[in-house]
Image (tube, helix red, strand yellow):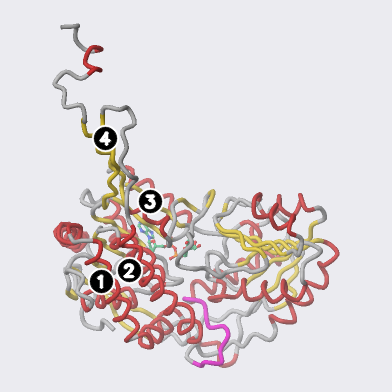
């Protein structure tokens, strides 16, 4: 782990030029995990300069050479998988079983996927569309990519940003979230271990307002890839527009979970609790709004409340802990505020709804919480809470269930629960989201894309589709007539 240097620029740790630092806090007990530098605009300039130089070298290497380096990166990460898991847990409060079994292996799998995908980038085959020219398509790197990541899955988000960018021959400057920069720094260290040239992967730790905006505004950055909240995403588009950067936005979500009356009730109940509480609900695809067809509604609410009460809150490092603290005390208070305001306007809290006391009082814990009787247009149904809170609402007709599912500004992910193939096909077609699960909620794979509809953003992370973001398509048109006077010239000057 990087304890001395805090930025990783041009293959080395640097302390930065601002002289300012930020403490990374363990939200389980408030202790300081590490102190990192806050990058200045000058540090951003240095990182972009290093990336610009390195991209010339990296972009000129063969896909096979890049692929070999990414394979070594996967091995380097695997060699310290347990360290990644421990550091991720200490800076986020995630239960160690989640970081060991999900965050870290999922990230390494993603690196391995891109090691293969790096060799499969090609344009379309050549052809003579007008008979006089051979056209071909080249797929080229964009250049230097500036990426900004959130705190909820720090390593995974760093990997999702860095890997498609560098697999396609770009260089990158990544700004992790202030709260959780440590595993992104480890990733950059492992890029060096893997023999990826210095400067291809740079990590600047710093604030959004200063380092983030400097990166967005930098003329040397050709593309911005951002994962975070929708309000900041809007700001990213605004700043990036000044230099007409390509923009890729993965933003907030408010995933619906639609249970039709023929669903397997037990599966839906278990799926709702797991889907709502994964990563303490700090997951952009987490199940947040369950719509349950009237005949199953009461049993579903009862079932979810019963399962929620079995969830074990505790120390994140204890392998028996199901749910750790929120990422910060501020985030916990934000979540508690949503639930308090919902109570105030008449919603009912069926389970949880409290900041736990006793041993857990020194951490940013919040109980798994089930809310009913909230109105569809209320804040708790419409806004992203990013905490362990599930709201359940009833519906009558299938049309109504799907319409309610679509009734927020977001469109990142959704699930439908039914044993009827026609209903499942209809839900998958009509729900406006970048991912629709049928009879499950959450699983993702490196081979398939992740990205939003509506105000959840645009562009795809993961999978071959991500290369559409991180490459630009060039049309090369070659005259094959060999004639000095082309046929079309007669439209410009007279017959001779
Ligand atoms: P956030 O938007 O507050 O911050 C995200 C990043 O943006 C951080 O690195 C922050 O420093 C930076 N930032 C903040 N203000 C900035 C500015 N003015 N200019 C440049 N950078 C700035 O989000 P968060 O609280 O870190 O993360 C939670 C959000 O991320 C949720 O909304 C969640 O849904 C979203 N998210 C989305 C996906 C997805 O794939 N769609 C994945 C994970 C998280």
Query: What segment carries the magenta color?
Result: 318-327
Q: What residue sits 28% from the left and 42% below the top?
A: 474
Element class at badge 3: helix
Which of the two labelled residues, at mark 3 and mark 4, occupies the earlier sequence position? 4
Task: Assess whether mark 1 and mark 3 are in contact (beta carbons under 8 angstroms).
Answer: no
Q: What residue sits 25% from the left and 34% below the top?
A: 477
The quadrant holding residue 116 is bottom left
Which of the two labelled residues, at mark 2 and mark 1, occupies the earlier sequence position? 1
Element class at badge 1: helix
In the rendered structure, find residue 134 and report the number of the disc placed on it: 4
The quadrant holding residue 175 is bottom left
Q: Is residue 12 left or right of residue 133?
A: left
- Percent from the top left, x then y, of residue 96? 48, 87
Which of the two labelled residues, at mark 3 and mark 1, occupies the earlier sequence position? 1
Mark-to-mark CA distance, 3 and 4: 23 Å
Element class at badge 2: helix
Mark-to-mark CA distance, 2 and 4: 32 Å
Q: Using a 10 Å C-alpha cutoff, classify the residue at mark 2 as few (fewer than 14 neighbours), some (14 to 19) or many (20 or more).
A: many
Which of the two labelled residues, at mark 2 and mark 4, occupies the earlier sequence position? 2
In the rendered structure, find residue 68 and report the number of the disc placed on it: 1
């Amino acid at each position: 782990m990087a304890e001395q240097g805090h930025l990783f620029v041009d293959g080395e740790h640097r302390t930065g030029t601002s002289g300012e630092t930020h403490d990374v806090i363990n939200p389980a007990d408030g202790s300081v995990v590490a102190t990192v530098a806050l990058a200045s605009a000058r540090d951003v300039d240095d990182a972009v300069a290093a990336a610009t130089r390195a991209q010339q070298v990296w972009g000129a290497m063969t896909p096979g050479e890049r692929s070999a380096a990414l394979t070594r990166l996967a091995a380097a990460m695997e060699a310290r998988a347990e360290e990644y898991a421990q550091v991720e847990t200490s800076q986020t409060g995630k239960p160690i079983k989640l970081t060991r079994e999900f965050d870290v292996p999922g990230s390494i799998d993603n690196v391995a996927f891109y090691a293969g995908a790096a060799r499969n980038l090609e344009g379309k085959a050549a052809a003579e569309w007008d008979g006089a020219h051979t056209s071909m398509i080249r797929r080229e790197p964009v250049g230097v990519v500036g990426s900004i990541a959130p705190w909820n899955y720090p390593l995974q988000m760093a990997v999702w940003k860095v890997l498609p960018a560098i697999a396609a021959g770009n260089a990158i400057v990544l700004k992790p979230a202030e709260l959780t920069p440590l595993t992104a720094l480890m990733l950059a260290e492992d890029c060096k271990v893997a023999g990826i040239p210095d400067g291809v992967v740079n990590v600047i730790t710093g604030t959004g307002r200063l380092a983030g905006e400097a990166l967005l505004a930098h003329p040397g950055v050709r593309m911005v890839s951002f994962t975070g909240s929708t309000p900041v995403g809007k700001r990213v588009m605004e700043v990036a527009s000044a230099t007409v950067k390509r923009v890729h936005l993965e933003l907030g979500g408010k995933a619906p979970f639609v249970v039709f009356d023929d669903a397997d009730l037990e599966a839906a109940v278990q799926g709702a609790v797991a889907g709502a509480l994964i990563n303490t609900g700090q997951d952009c695809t987490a199940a947040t709004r369950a719509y349950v067809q009237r005949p199953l509604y009461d049993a579903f609410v009862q079932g979810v409340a019963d399962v929620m009460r079995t969830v074990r809150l505790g120390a994140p490092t204890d392998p028996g802990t199901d749910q750790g603290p929120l990422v910060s005390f501020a985030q916990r208070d934000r979540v508690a505020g949503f639930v308090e305001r919902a109570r105030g306007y008449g919603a009912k809290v069926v389970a949880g709804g409290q900041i736990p006391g006793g041993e857990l009082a020194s951490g940013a814990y919040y109980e798994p919480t089930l809310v009913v009787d909230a109105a569809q247009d209320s804040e708790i149904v419409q806004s992203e809470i990013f905490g362990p809170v599930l709201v359940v609402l009833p519906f009558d007709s299938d049309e109504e269930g799907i319409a309610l599912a679509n009734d927020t500004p977001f469109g990142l992910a959704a699930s439908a629960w039914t044993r009827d193939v026609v209903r499942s096909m209809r839900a998958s077609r009509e729900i406006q989201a970048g991912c629709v699960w049928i009879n499950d909620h959450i699983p993702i794979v490196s081979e398939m894309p992740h990205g939003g509809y509506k105000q959840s953003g645009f562009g795809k992370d993961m999978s071959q589709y991500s290369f559409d973001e991180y490459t630009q398509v060039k049309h090369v048109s070659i005259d094959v007539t060999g004639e000095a006077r082309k046929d079309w010239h007669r439209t410009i000057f007279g017959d001779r």
